Amino acid sequence: MTVPAKTRLLDSVNSPDDLKGRSRDDLKQIADEVRAEVIEAVSVTGGHLGAGLGVVELTVAIHSVFNTPDDKLIFDVGHQCYPHKILTGRKDRIRTLRQGGGLSGFTKRAESEYDPFGAAHASTSISAGLGFAKARDLAERDNKVVCVIGDGAMSAGMAYEAMNNAGSDASRMLVILNDNDMSIAPPVGAMSHYLSKLVSSRSYRGLRKFAKTIVKPIGLANPARKAEEYLRGFAMGGTMFEELGFYYVGPIDGHDLDVLLPVLENCKAMQTGPVLLHVVTQKGKGYEPAENSADKYHGVAKFNVVTGEQQKSKSGPPSYTKVFAQSLIEEARKDDRIVGITAAMPGGTGLDLFEKEFPDRMFDVGIAEQHAVTFAAGMAADGMKPFAAIYSTFLQRGYDQVVHDVAIQNLPVRFAIDRAGLVGADGPTHAGSFDIGFLGALPGMVCMAAADETELVRMVRTAVEIDDGPSAFRYPRGNGVGVELPLNPQALEIGKGRIVREGTSIAILSYGARLQEALKAAEMLAAQGLSCTVADARFAKPLDKELINRLAKEHEVLLTIEEGARGGFGAFTLEHLAETGALDSGLKIRTLHLPDIFQDQDKPELMYAEAGLDARSIAARAIEALGRGNVQELERLARA
Ligand SMILES: Cc1ncc(C[n+]2csc(CCOP(=O)(O)OP(=O)(O)O)c2C)c(N)n1
Ligand SMILES: CC(=O)[C@@H](O)[C@H](O)COP(=O)(O)O
Ligand SMILES: [Mg+2]
């Protein structure tokens, strides 16, 4: 019988308990195996790779020192949690990450007791951790609270609101600042410069060597006192964190278990108020293609482990994002008052392209959507034409600013709302579900949704022209439908939709990119002799009341459809029809929107089918409302 030269230690780790009492060498081997496992898993699923690779040693160290799940470990954003999932009983399902029915790509309470707090949006961990710390104190328990937050996430206001609170009342908690000098894109802002200065100081360079030789576990007598004395050697003194009431420790090498383990032991033993441990790591650590790439493999498609080459997306029409960016560039060439604003998503919003052409007119403000919106409002108030390009889901964080700073003052900020509707693998935290409702509720806001790329280009043009109040246009993640782009786009008439297909019995009024499915549904209905009108509303605010009245009057059935939650375009239409009395005449109306649940991740087309927003489901709703036609026949057509 042959005995394998090196047995995988990770196979024997089914929970963090299996890390306890292991030798340093064993833990180092386990860390190496976790790293290999993360790379293998993400190579078949795609997902967030660089961040997780950067915290492998840190995660192993935390789980071997702290007593999770009693001690609460809270990851900020949660995109770096794959090593944590592997170590906390989810190793066997790690190749289901971000797939339908599989593990979430983020921490999620419903998934494991080791995920005490779910995330995916940035900068929530310190606030949540403080909540856990206070709940613990009130219940007179003694568990620890550990938050892991990145340098990028440290740029957001929430992190400072939380530190302001935690530092003032000496709350016992550990905040680990995972500083890899990267956000999704290179980090921006004064805070980022400050952290770089801390890290590049002499003390850190000296410490790397120093720590390896002198770091020892603390003695048992007076552990808290000794821990403090011990850690004082690491602290640099006078840091901004200390001014905020934190005990600052670091910076230390976040890949060196010989340093991490004793420092964490000592942080754990400390009984003073909040501690901030500054850990320096490398995003993408241990996988050459990630280390060498500009974005450190923040988010990747499936890839070849040997070469690092990522699967190319099928060639097709350009993405909506790119179409938006290029048309904004065109507009900006003609109008030097146009500026672009992003909150740490230059690549995701396409504003990196804009920046290449107009470096002085693009502003990346960091992970700071609230600030981005008010900053845009200030610019608009002084005569500029700001385009704030923000994902629908992240704009949620800036809602009060949209209301208070933009809408009430009727300022012409243009919101380019990317990732509208379902986004697939990122799941419910990233779905752009709510902006139709929350923006449509605001007096004076013009709300548009693009049915295809041509429409998007025209909406950018329209937004440039709307100079007397706020406007927004939404468009989905992914590729357009492949229509030809207008060379000289004309602005749309505000509040006017268009008829795309004429029919008699059924009217489908689409708001946004479901128009293609609506047209397919119309074909399916036509195959059964059911004549269907399809219209593109273009505007949710102001509504095209004339168009709606006409559709209501001339058809037996009216369906509205949108890539958004209930309380959006369908609700606005229904309200209008109720007010005009059109509902009293027997019109059969159905509002098709996202279901009233947070849908888990899957392929977008499957999620839309589950939501009842694919062509087959649209046609089936029409048949149900009409009371004529054959639903089974639709199945056959959908398969064909
Ligand atoms: C509120 C919010 N805005 C934007 C994002 C998009 N986002 C996800 S991760 C990330 C960068 C985070 O950087 P950092 O905290 O340093 O973590 P790292 O990826 O470097 O480990 C950004 C901007 C988000 N998740 N939440
Ligand atoms: C974790 C996070 O918020 C981002 O990395 C997000 O996953 C990016 O989404 P897109 O891939 O749609 O840009
Ligand atoms: Mg970072």
Image: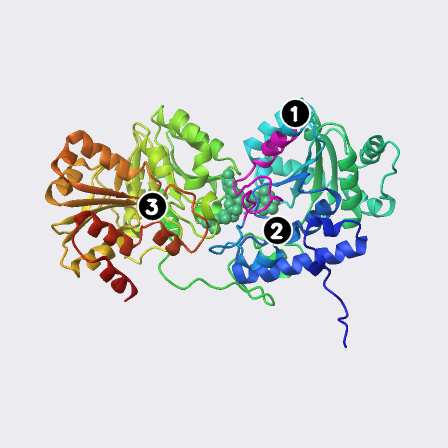
Residue on which the image places disc 1 = 138
Q: CA distance from mark 1 to mark 2?
A: 30 Å
**Does the magenta-highlighted stretch encompass residue 108?**
yes
- Residue drawn at (56%, 66%) of the image: 304
Image position of 583 with respect to 534: above or below: above
Kind of residue sitting beneath label 3: Glu
Query: Element at badge 3?
Result: loop
Asked which colour scheme the image uses, the reply is rainbow
Kind of residue sitting beneath label 1: Leu
Image position of 243 with respect to 493: above or below: above
**Does the magenta-highlighted stretch encompass residue 130?**
yes
Residue on which the image places disc 2 = 85
Circle nearer the N terminus (1, 3) = 1
Label 2 close to label 3 by CB (< 8 Å): no
Which tag is nearer the camera, tag 1 or tag 3?
Answer: 1
Image position of 626 with respect to 405: above or below: below
Query: Element at badge 1?
Result: helix
Quadrant of the picture in which ligand 3 is shown: top right
Query: Element at badge 2?
Result: helix
Residue on which the image places disc 3 = 563
> Looking at the picture, how far across and down is residue 393, in whole percent?
44, 40
> Looking at the picture, how far across and down is residue 197, in whole percent?
69, 38
Magenta-colored span: 106-133
